[in-house]
Image (spheres, rainbow, N blue to C red):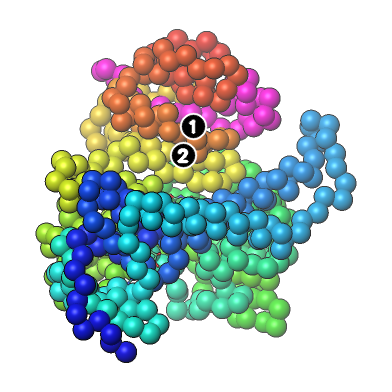
C-alpha cells in the first residue's frame, strides 16, 4: 500500500544505522543539520548486532573458560569447570542490547529522527522508504549512504542450519564438537579461536599460503603456534570444493596439493569475504558511480560522483572496519556542514582479536620501502617486559617503523596480549607527527605493556635498557 502521496522533505538523510551511519548522523546533528536516519534492520548495524561486539563477547567468554580451567605453570588447577552455553549467549545478547539501546538513546538525544524501513533511491534528491506495510516518499538535500556489507555466499556452500555465515556461527545454541572454517581471514580466525577456547575441535581451511593475509609472517606465525596449542588444525593452500549435509552434520570436500579430501564436522562456517550492500538501492537511477564489485567511488571528502550524495563504511574502498566507517561518517557529516574535512587513512589501525592479538597502523616495513622511504624497523619483545612476564603473556613484540633521516614514526605492528589497546598510542604518534625520540621520552608507568612500545622506540635510537 502506498500511503505517502505527499513527499516528506528532509535536510540530511543517512541511510543505514551501523557504526558509519549512526556516527555520521550524530556528527551531522552536532553541526546543526536536521537529520533523519533510516534503517531496515536493527540500529547499530552489523558491528553492534552480529559483528564486532558479539564476536568479542564470545571470544572473551571463551578466554574466561580457558583461563578458568587452570594455569599449570602458575600452579593453578581447577576441576569440573563447565560452560552453560545458553547463558553465554544470553550474556552476549545483553551486551548487544545495551549498546544498541544506547545508540537509539544517543540518536534521540541529538534530535535525529529515526525511520524504520528499506530505502530505495528514485533520483538524486528522492528516496522511497518501505516497511512491511507502507511506502513513503522523502526528498532530501544531502544524503550519506552507509548500507554496509553482507557475507558472500559461495555457490557450492549455500547457508543453512549447518552451513553457517558469521551471523549463524555467533548465534549457535550449542558448542560444536567439531567445526570446519573455510577462510582464515580475521573473522574466520577470530570465531575459530572463540570456539576452540570452548573445546571445539576446529579445522581452518585457507585457500592461500597463510592465514590472516596482510599481516607480517612473524605475526601470523605466533597466532598459528597458539592455534596449534589449542588443537586447531590450519590447512593452507586448501581449496574447499563442496559440502554435503548429513543428518547431524556436514562433510566438507577440499583439495590440497592435488589431493581430494573430506572432513566431517557438526558445523561448517564459511567466511570468505563480504560484498557491499549497493546492489538493491536503485543507485543506477541516480548516477552514483561504482566499481564492478559494487564499491561506491568517493573522493577524499566521501562525496560520490553525485555531488549531494556521500558514501561511507563497508560500501567504499578500504578495510571493512567499524572505526573506518565511523571516521568516514564524521568526515561526510562535516563536509556537508561546510567544514574542511578530508580522509587520511594512514592512522587507521587494523586489529585481529586472535590469540595473541595482532594490530597494525600506518606502514609496514615492506610498504614503507615500497613507498620509497628509507626506514628503521625496531623491535622489542614482550618476553623482556616485566608486565608481560607477570601476565604470563610473553609471546609477541612491538615493531616500530621510523624514517631513517628524522625518526618520524610512520608505522607500527604489535603482536601480543592487549595489542588492540596498545596500538592506539602508536596511531597517535603517527597522527601527531611524533618521532621515536618523542615516544622514548614519554614516561610509561611500570610495569605495563606500554613500556614495550617505549623500548621499541629506544631500540630505534640505539639506547634500549632491557635488551642488549
Ligand atoms: C563477525 C564480524 C566481526 C567483526 N569484527 C570487527 C571488529 O572487531 N572491528 C571492526 O572494526 N570491524 C569488525 N567487523 C566489521 C564491521 O562490523 C563493519 O566494518 C562495520 O559494521 C561496517 O559499518 P557500516 O556502517 O559500513 O555498515 P553496517 O554495520 O553493515 O550497517 C549497515 C546498515 O545499513 C542497513 N541497510 C542496508 N541496506 C539498507 C537499505 N536499503 N535501507 C535501509 N537500511 C539499509 C543495514 O540494516 C545495517 O543496519 C566485523 C564484522 C563481522 C561480520
Which dot, 2 or 1, sits closer to the camera? Answer: 1
Q: Is residue 267 left or right of residue 9?
A: right
Q: Is residue 351 left or right of residue 169?
A: left
Marker disc for residue 359: 2
Q: Secondary structure at mark 2?
A: strand
Instruction: From this view, report whether residue 31 is shown above or below residue 460.
Output: below
Residue at 83% across / 31% down in the picture?
A: 75
Instruction: From this view, report whether residue 416 is shown above or below residue 274.
Output: above
Marker disc for residue 180: none
> Looking at the image, do the residues carrying marks 2 and 1 touch, with CB atoms under 8 Å apart?
yes
Q: Look at the image and say whether residue 402 sits in the magenta stretch.
A: yes
Horizontal and vertical percent for residue 309? 18, 61
Task: Count the marks.
Answer: 2
Crowd tier of the residue under label 1, counting other residues whose Cα lies within 10 Å: few below 14, some 14–19, many 20 or above: some
Residue at 32% across / 62% down in the picture?
A: 113
- How far apart in space, not on screen, are marks 2 and 1 (Cα)? 9 Å
Horizontal and vertical percent for residue 406? 27, 17
Marker disc for residue 422: 1
Question: Which residue is outermost to the right?
Answer: 79
Residue at 60% across / 80% down in the picture?
A: 244
Quadrant the N terminus occupies: bottom left
Residue at 62% across / 23% down in the picture?
A: 387
Amino acid at each position: 500500500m502506498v500511503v505517502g502521496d505527499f513527499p516528506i522533505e528532509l535536510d540530511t538523510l543517512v541511510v543505514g544505522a551501523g557504526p558509519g551511519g549512526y556516527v555520521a548522523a550524530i556528527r551531522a546533528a552536532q553541526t546543526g543539520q536536521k537529520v533523519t536516519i533510516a534503517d531496515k534492520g536493527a540500529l547499530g548495524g552489523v558491528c553492534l548486532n552480529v559483528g564486532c561486539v558479539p564476536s568479542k563477547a564470545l571470544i572473551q567468554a571463551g578466554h574466561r573458560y580457558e583461563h578458568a580451567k587452570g594455569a599449570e605453570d602458575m600452579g593453578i588447577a581447577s576441576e569440573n569447570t563447565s560452560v552453560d552455553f545458553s547463558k553465554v549467549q544470553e550474556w552476549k545478547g545483553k551486551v548487544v542490547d545495551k549498546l544498541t539501546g544506547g545508540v537509539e538513546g544517543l540518536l534521540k538525544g541529538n534530535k535525529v529522527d529515526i525511520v524504520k524501513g528499506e530505502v530505495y533511491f528514485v533520483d538524486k534528491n528522492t528516496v522511497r522508504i518501505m516497511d512491511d506495510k507502507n511506502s513513503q516518499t522523502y526528498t532530501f538535500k544531502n544524503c550519506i549512504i552507509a548500507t554496509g556489507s553482507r557475507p558472500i555466499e559461495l555457490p557450492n556452500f549455500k547457508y543453512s542450519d549447518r552451513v553457517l555465515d558469521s551471523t549463524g556461527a555467533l548465534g549457535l545454541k550449542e558448542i560444536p564438537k567439531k567445526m570446519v572454517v573455510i577462510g582464515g581471514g580475521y573473522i574466520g580466525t577470530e570465531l575459530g579461536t572463540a570456539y576452540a577456547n570452548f573445546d571445539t575441535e576446529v579445522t581452518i581451511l585457507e585457500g592461500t599460503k597463510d592465514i590472516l593475509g596482510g599481516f607480517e609472517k612473524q605475526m601470523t606465525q605466533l597466532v598459528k603456534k597458539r592455534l596449534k596449542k589449542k588443537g586447531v588444525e590450519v590447512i593452507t593452500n586448501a581449496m574447499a570444493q563442496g559440502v554435503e549435509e548429513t543428518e547431524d552434520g556436514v562433510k566438507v570436500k577440499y583439495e590440497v596439493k592435488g589431493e581430494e579430501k573430506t572432513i566431517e564436522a557438526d558445523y561448517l562456517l564459511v567466511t570468505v569475504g563480504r560484498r557491499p550492500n549497493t546492489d538493491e538501492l536503485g543507485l543506477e537511477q541516480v548516477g552514483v558511480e561504482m566499481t564492478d564489485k559494487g564499491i561506491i567511488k568517493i573522493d577524499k571528502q566521501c562525496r560520490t560522483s553525485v555531488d549531494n550524495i556521500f558514501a561511507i563504511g563497508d560500501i567504499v574502498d578500504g578495510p571493512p572496519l567499524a572505526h573506518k566507517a565511523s571516521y568516514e561518517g564524521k568526515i561526510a557529516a562535516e563536509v556537508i556542514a561546510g567544514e574542511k574535512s578530508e580522509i587520511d587513512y594512514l592512522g587507521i589501525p587494523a586489529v585481529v582479536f586472535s590469540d595473541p592479538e595482532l594490530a597494525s597502523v600506518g606502514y609496514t616495513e615492506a610498504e614503507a620501502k615500497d613507498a620509497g622511504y628509507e626506514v628503521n624497523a625496531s623491535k622489542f619483545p614482550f618476553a623482556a617486559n616485566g608486565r608481560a612476564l607477570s601476565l604470563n603473556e610473553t609471546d609477541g613484540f612491538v615493531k616500530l617503523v621510523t624514517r631513517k633521516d628524522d625518526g618520524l614514526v610512520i608505522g607500527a605492528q604489535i603482536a601480543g596480549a592487549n595489542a588492540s589497546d596498545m596500538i592506539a598510542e602508536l596511531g597517535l604518534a603517527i597522527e601527531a607527527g611524533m618521532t621515536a625520540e618523542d615516544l622514548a621520552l614519554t614516561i610509561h608507568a611500570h610495569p605495563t605493556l606500554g613500556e614495550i612500545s617505549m623500548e621499541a622506540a629506544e631500540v630505534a635510537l640505539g639506547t634500549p635498557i632491557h635488551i642488549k
